């Protein structure tokens, strides 16, 4: 057994394990020299070549069943028979390089979380704009989904993108909720990226937790505004409380809009509703999709209603800084 790669070079295999099912079928597991380099190209394929020789009885009819591709090699009255089949994308995590990059991706999850949390508190303490943080998270969200597009990467490069999933509040590499969906993927690109539906549910749950934290912070600042009315700290509390009307909630929705809309559409198109969990997920997908249409209209109505504020002093416009920097305020039509 050997591999013919895309440059027509022959490579030996690293190892092979056989399991004899009966006297006609053998399952085998091959370990390649460079598994992360195989199965990447469509027009030029890597091929596993198997040469068989019947040395016991040249007249005996036998079969070698290749379960991976359902190809059958039939040996009839011939001492030497050769067959080959195309190698698909290989994710062999016994390989040292692929194991290293997978472990590094898991560690970088926590590095990215630390970067976001530290930057948040630094900007909070300095009492300056959070725009650098929001920009970082938005770019992380865009980069995180690049492997889901219809092109193939070298397998261990998928791990280089995984830490960016922190921008979608996917904070853990493992699935803690709905583990029955840990092997359920929307399509093959999600499987290559190791992004099952259970991780998308993790994102949804963390978004709801973050919303709860925001509401609690709003309540705490509201209570503190009655006890801390003067001094530097009082001004700090007043300035942060004003951000909850309406910047904080607008920003929260801007950061979650892509997840809600994209995941909802993917689940609706998926069409699998065989279990109660799937039916519940489909119900919420329709709810989130409708919400993704209604809430922007609500924000539009709010901006049009507050249009005199947008035209007025800077203090009034500051309540809409999250969104106002991206629109032209010259007329209601341009706001629309």
Image (cartoon, rainbow, N blue to C red):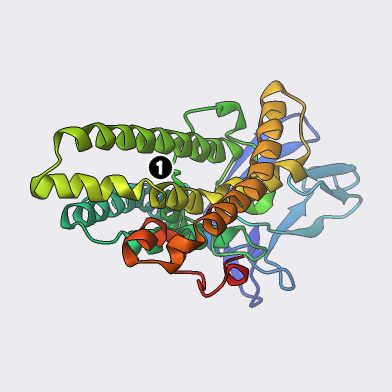
x, y (%) of residue 29?
A: 61, 44
Q: Crowdedness of circle 1 by 10 Å Cα count: few (<14), some, many (20+)? A: many
* Up-down relation of residue 332 to residue 265 (above or below): below
* Residue 288: quadrant of the picture: top right
Q: Badge 1 is on which residue?
A: 171
Closest to the observer: 84 or 181? 181
Closest to the observer: 227 or 62? 227
Q: Residue furthest bottom?
A: 7
Residue at (69%, 49%) from the top-left corner? 187
Question: Is residue 310 visible from the viewing direction of this image?
Answer: yes
Residue at (17%, 52%) from the top-left corner? 125
Residue at (63%, 78%) from the top-left corner? 7
* Up-down relation of residue 174 to residue 145 (above or below): above
x, y (%) of residue 308?
A: 47, 62
For label 1, the SS is loop
- How many numbered discs? 1
Quarter of the N terminus within the rendering? bottom right
Q: Residue furthest top?
A: 276
* Residue 56: quadrant of the picture: top right
x, y (%) of residue 197?
A: 60, 38
Q: Quick check: 323 left or right of 272? A: left
Quarter of the C terminus within the rendering? bottom right
* Residue 86: quadrant of the picture: bottom right
x, y (%) of residue 119?
A: 25, 56
Q: Residue furthest left?
A: 231
Question: Is residue 193 visible from the viewing direction of this image?
Answer: no
Q: Quick check: 144 left or right of 39? A: left
Residue at (68%, 51%) from the top-left corner? 188
Closest to the observer: 81 or 325? 325
Q: Quick check: 274 left or right of 310? A: right
């Amino acid at each position: 057994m050997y591999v013919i790669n895309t440059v027509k070079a022959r490579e030996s295999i690293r190892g092979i394990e056989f399991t004899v099912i009966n006297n006609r079928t053998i399952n085998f597991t091959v370990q390649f020299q460079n598994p992360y380099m195989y199965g990447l190209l469509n027009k030029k394929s890597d091929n596993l070549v198997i040469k068989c020789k019947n040395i016991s009885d040249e007249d005996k009819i036998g079969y070698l069943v290749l379960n991976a591709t359902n190809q059958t090699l039939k040996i009839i009255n011939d001492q030497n028979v050769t067959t080959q089949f195309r190698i698909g994308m290989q994710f062999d995590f016994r390989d040292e390089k692929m194991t290293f990059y997978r472990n590094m991706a898991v560690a970088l999850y926590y590095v990215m979380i630390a970067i976001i949390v530290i930057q948040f508190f630094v900007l909070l303490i300095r009492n300056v704009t959070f725009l650098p943080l929001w920009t970082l998270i938005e770019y992380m969200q865009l980069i995180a989904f690049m492997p889901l597009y219809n092109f193939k990467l070298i397998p261990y490069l998928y791990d280089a993108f995984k830490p960016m999933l922190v921008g979608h509040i996917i904070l853990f590499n493992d699935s803690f909720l709905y583990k029955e969906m840990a092997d359920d993927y929307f399509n093959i690109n999600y499987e290559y990226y190791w992004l099952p539906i259970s991780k998308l549910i993790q994102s949804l749950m963390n978004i709801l937790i973050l919303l709860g934290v925001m509401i609690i912070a709003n309540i705490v600042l509201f209570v503190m505004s009655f006890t801390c009315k003067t001094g530097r700290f009082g001004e700090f509390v007043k300035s942060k409380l004003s951000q909850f009307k309406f910047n904080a909630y607008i920003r929260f929705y801007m950061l979650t809009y892509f997840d809600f809309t994209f995941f909802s559409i993917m689940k609706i198109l998926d069409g699998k509703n065989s279990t109660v969990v799937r039916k519940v997920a489909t119900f919420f997908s329709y709810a989130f999709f409708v919400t993704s249409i209604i809430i922007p209209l609500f924000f539009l109505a709010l901006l049009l209603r507050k249009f005199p504020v947008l035209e007025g002093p800077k203090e009034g416009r500051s309540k809409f800084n999250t969104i106002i920097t991206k629109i032209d305020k010259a007329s209601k039509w341009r706001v629309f």
